[in-house]
Image (cartoon, grey):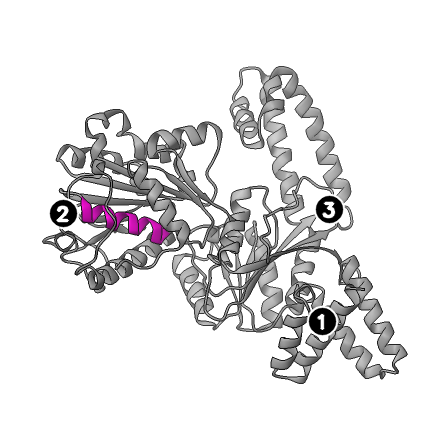
């Protein structure tokens, strides 16, 4: 029998089959796209009557290693299950009925990749990230930087030899333009071999417009979409809470922001007068046009475009590096459960380093960082220490947005926001993977009020919570109107009941923690059970306060 799939994966594979084993899938990070693709490859292997080469393209070396592990584990498990396995019949367009035993020969968990000689069926080869294995392995995993200049040629040559190709394009939104699109240079010559060519594009967020059209021509149309709300509702990812934390500029930051915005508005008017289509474009298209206009022969337009882009970058940096972010993140970490693992995402390395130093002083030896200036080995070590629990807090920049699997992280903090919906979903996906003992996940978005930085909205399923908070750096406090009102009632009742000063102080401590958590939203039955399970007096006190908040909030 095959490894058990989620219902969405089985439905998706059926649609893929009906589409001639070609198409793109949009599915939330952590929902099982890798297993989906490897099951598709396995089913093809069992039903074609000639050699099938599986080509997997990924954007980073980290993802290459992740796929390498996944393929090895999948092949090892398949080898144990394959005797007597039966799979529902495919449509006739796929091919014959080749033996699974023949196609899986030579596999085994001890095979890490395809170095060496001899029969390479069932073997794995890596290309990129320092690897240059022979390309005749049945499974080839390419980092896009290497695939650009060799994959198209290899695919066309193997098709001409009569082989069948299954191209898996992971994070396929990366391959729609520029040099990355060179991997599809074989497409004008593929028509005679169309029946030998199968595809599967994977992404959490497929692009739109011309980018979508290009990928559709290369990989097939979108055949399935599996979003965050569905994944949460059906238990594919764990339940989650999203917090939007509103921050303010400090000192002269607001005045500088407004000055930059006014200058940008003036330049934008000049550019729109010359190119009215700018108004009808989305942000990505606008910036592409502006970059092109920087080389315009019209010096006035070129200077306006160049000036606008420089001011835009400067304004973005001002918002990204606003002083309140570090203070808020530091105060937030102090209030979170000391047993939870925390991933902190930043946009700028110097910001990440500053927060790292502050947290390292507070939690010596329990904080790590992961970014491009650390080096591959240092990043690998930090991630491994985070996996094993040697460190509890990991601060990362964009290097972790794709290709890093951290299954037991339950809290994510977006230190500096991004307007890109794709990054938002990917970062949420980093903490939503189901893991034993993991009940819920929480994601905190820090954003500056009244700026170009959008407040992130993500769909909430029936059991997920969205909470708006405000942070005041002068008071070093968080505010939420409903919670604050309920907390005031709780403390008032305690004072009327004659509670001691020590009891009031302890209640204030617990309430100060609860405002940045969603425990008070869980309901009385959940809270009563946590009171019963509490392992210490401090923990019990916290849950008693949450029970009282629940009661006060309901009246």
Of the 4 image quadrants, the one containing the C terminus is bottom right
Q: Quadrant of the N terminus?
A: bottom left
Which stretch appears magenta? 34-47
Residue 449: assigned label? 3
Cα separation between marks 3 and 1: 29 Å
Q: Is residue 455 left or right of residue 119?
A: right
Residue at 63% in and 81% down: 532
Q: Nearer the viewer, residue 370 or 452?
A: 452
| 3D distance between C-alphas at marks 2 and 1 | 61 Å
Under circle 3, the secondary element is: loop
Asked whether residue 372 is in view, the answer is no
Give the mark nearer the N terminus: 3 vs 1.
Answer: 3
Q: Decide which of 534, 397 is in the foreground and name it.
A: 534
Cβ–Cβ below 8 Å for labels 2 and 3?
no
Q: Quadrant of residue 68?
A: bottom left
Q: Which residue is mark 1?
A: 546
Up the image or down, 220 lies above or below 205; here it is: above
Identify the residue shown where x is 19% and y is 45%: 47
Is 509 drawn above or below residue 131 in the view shown? below
Q: Is residue 217 magenta?
A: no
Q: Which mark is residue 98?
A: 2
In contact (CB < 8 Å): disc 2 and disc 1: no
Whole-percent x, y for residue 398 in the image: 50, 50
Q: Is residue 113 left or right of residue 373?
A: left
Instruction: Kindly state the secondary structure of the residue where label 2 is placed.
Output: loop
Q: Earlier in the sequence, mark 2 or mark 1?
A: 2
Q: Position of residue 282 (x, y in %)?
A: 57, 29
Task: Report helix, strand or loop for mark 1.
Answer: helix
Sequence-wise first label, 2 or 3? 2
Q: Residue at x 18, y 54 (%)?
A: 122
Residue for point 34% across, 35% down: 219
How many C-alpha atoms fall within 10 Å of the one at disc 1: few (<14), some, or many (≥20)?
A: many
């Amino acid at each position: 029998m095959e490894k058990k799939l989620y219902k969405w994966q089985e439905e998706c594979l059926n649609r893929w089959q009906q589409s001639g084993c070609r198409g793109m899938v949009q599915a939330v990070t952590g929902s099982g796209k890798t297993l989906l693709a490897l099951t598709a490859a396995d089913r093809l292997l069992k039903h074609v009557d000639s050699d099938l080469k599986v080509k997997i393209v990924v954007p980073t070396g980290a993802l290459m290693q992740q796929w390498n592990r996944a393929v090895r584990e999948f092949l090892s498990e398949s080898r144990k299950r394959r005797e007597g396995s039966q799979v529902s019949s495919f449509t006739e367009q796929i091919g014959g009925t080749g033996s699974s035993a023949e196609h899986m020969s030579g596999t085994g968990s001890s095979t890490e990749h395809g170095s060496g000689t001899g029969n390479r069926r069932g073997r794995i080869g890596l290309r990129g990230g320092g690897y240059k294995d022979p390309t005749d392995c049945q499974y080839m995993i390419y980092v896009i930087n290497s695939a650009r200049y060799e994959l198209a040629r290899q695919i066309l040559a193997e098709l001409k030899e009569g082989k069948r190709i299954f191209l898996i394009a992971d994070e396929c939104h990366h391959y729609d333009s520029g040099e990355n699109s060179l991997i599809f240079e074989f497409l004008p010559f593929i028509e005679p071999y169309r029946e030998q060519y199968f595809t599967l594009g994977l992404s959490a967020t497929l692009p739109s417009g011309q980018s979508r059209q290009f990928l559709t021509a290369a990989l097939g149309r979108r055949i399935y979409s599996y979003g965050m709300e569905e994944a949460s509702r059906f238990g594919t990812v764990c339940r989650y809470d999203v917090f939007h934390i509103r921050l303010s500029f400090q000192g002269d930051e607001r005045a500088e922001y407004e000055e930059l915005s006014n200058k940008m508005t003036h330049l934008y008017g000049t550019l729109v007068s010359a190119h009215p289509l700018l108004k009808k474009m989305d942000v990505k298209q606008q910036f592409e046009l502006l970059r092109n206009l920087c080389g315009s022969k019209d010096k006035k337009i070129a200077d306006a475009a160049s000036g606008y882009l420089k001011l835009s970058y400067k304004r973005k940096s001002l918002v990204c590096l606003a002083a309140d972010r570090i203070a808020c993140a530091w105060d937030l970490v102090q209030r979170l459960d000391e047993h939870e693992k925390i991933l902190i995402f930043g946009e700028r390395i110097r910001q990440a380093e500053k927060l790292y130093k502050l947290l390292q002083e507070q939690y010596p030896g329990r904080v790590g960082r992961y970014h491009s200036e650390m080096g591959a080995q240092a990043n690998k070590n930090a991630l491994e220490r985070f996996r094993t629990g040697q460190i509890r807090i990991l601060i990362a920049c964009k290097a972790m947005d794709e290709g890093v699997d951290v299954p037991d992280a339950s809290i994510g903090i977006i230190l500096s926001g991004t307007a890109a919906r794709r990054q938002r979903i990917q970062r949420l996906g980093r903490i939503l993977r189901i893991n034993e003992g993991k009940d819920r996940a929480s994601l905190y978005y820090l954003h500056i009020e009244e700026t170009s930085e959008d407040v992130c909205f993500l769909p909430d399923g029936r059991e997920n919570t969205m909470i708006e908070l405000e942070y005041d750096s002068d008071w070093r406090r968080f505010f939420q109107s409903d919670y604050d009102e309920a907390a005031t009632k709780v403390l008032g009742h305690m004072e009327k009941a004659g509670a001691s000063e020590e009891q009031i102080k302890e209640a204030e401590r617990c309430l100060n923690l609860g405002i940045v958590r969603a425990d008070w939203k869980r309901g009385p039955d959940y809270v009563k059970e946590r009171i019963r399970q509490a392992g210490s007096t401090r923990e019990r006190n916290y849950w008693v306060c949450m029970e009282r908040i629940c009661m006060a909030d309901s009246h």
